[in-house]
Image: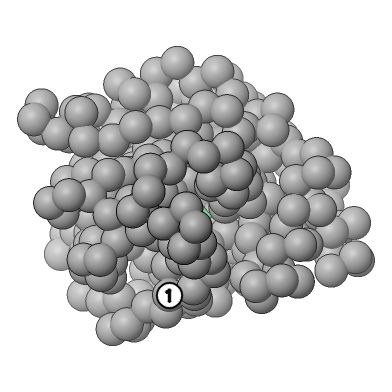
Amino acid sequence: MFPLPVTTINITKLIKDDSKGIAIDILRLDEIHAIISGNKWFKLQYYLNEAIAKKATVIATFGGPYSNHIVATAYAGKITGITTKGYIRGEQPRVLSHTLQHCVTYGMELQFLSRLAYDNLKKSTALGNEYVIPEGGYGMLGSNGASNIQQFIPPNYNTIICAVGSGTMIAGLCKTQQPGQSILGIVITKGNTSIVNEINTLLPLDKHQNYTLNNGYHFGGYAKHTQELLLFMQQINHTYQVPLDFVYTAKAFYGVMDLYKNNYFAEGSNILFIHSGGIQGNSSLENYKAKA
Ligand SMILES: *Cc1c(COP(=O)(O)O)cnc(C)c1O
């Protein structure tokens, strides 16, 4: 079994605006584990349980060189004693990213693939004797795992907001949506026209209307960023002591604050932003590290 490492998750209270009747707080999934951070433990849990039940000797998965999912899987392999293999998108670089260096430390075997070979191989559901976890943990087991995040959301929050990458986490939240709860996802990729379809594929038909997506805060696309975004991260960290990552949570939380300023939220909105982790990815931002 691969149980969650915690029984409670902290909530950081940020804003209580009585004039607008709005509160904004943050569920700190980033604090549950230093390496399998944020939503990744939730998303991996049922895959790992299945791999253990099937007595898999190798767990394989797919990701880019900065992937939070890849490093989380590598570490999970170390904990469970199962060998892991990472299929990495792109040619092998001269110097490995910090993320991939960590993967190697945790015992993961890396195999670099051209984009084309990667895209072909990632469609596989079984690779010889390897138990395959899909790229980013996307899939039914991943979203079932993410649905357990709801257990840590107190009932007084009526508005749940999270970042959307593959859509696995938001699909999970929709599966266990509570009465009176609205769920908003901020998409951190640009021009992903299939995201609604990918989310709905994980959901029964009667839950296809359970969420709203906002596409206005991708900052140029996946892992792209602007000086303004980096400044925002520094400000939030300085003012509230909440570190954000530049790929997912900074964009999504920027969206929350911008929507709040523009009076998007109705009076009485009690907002809980899901901090889905990812801080390790900031190690690819040399300048940010130096300034932080
Ligand atoms: C992986 C990840 C996400 C995206 O989750 P999906 O289930 O792929 O939508 C969001 N935030 C962080 C920090 C992540 O690492």
- Residue at position x 57%, y 28% from top? 216
Image quarter for residue 11?
A: bottom left
As drawn, 103 above or below 112: below
Where residue 76 sits: x, y (%)?
42, 69
Which residue extends farthest front?
Answer: 19
As drawn, 207 above or below 195: below
- Residue at position x 52%, y 27% from top? 215
Image quarter for residue 194?
A: top left
Where residue 224 sits: x, y (%)?
73, 36
Report the residue marked by disc 1. 11
Placement of the C terminus among the 4 image quadrants: bottom right
Q: In this rendering, does residue 36 appear at all?
A: no
Q: In this rendering, does residue 168 appear at all?
A: yes
As drawn, 102 above or below 213: below
Placement of the N terminus among the 4 image quadrants: bottom left
Query: As rendered, which of 102 and 250 lies closer to the eye?
Result: 250
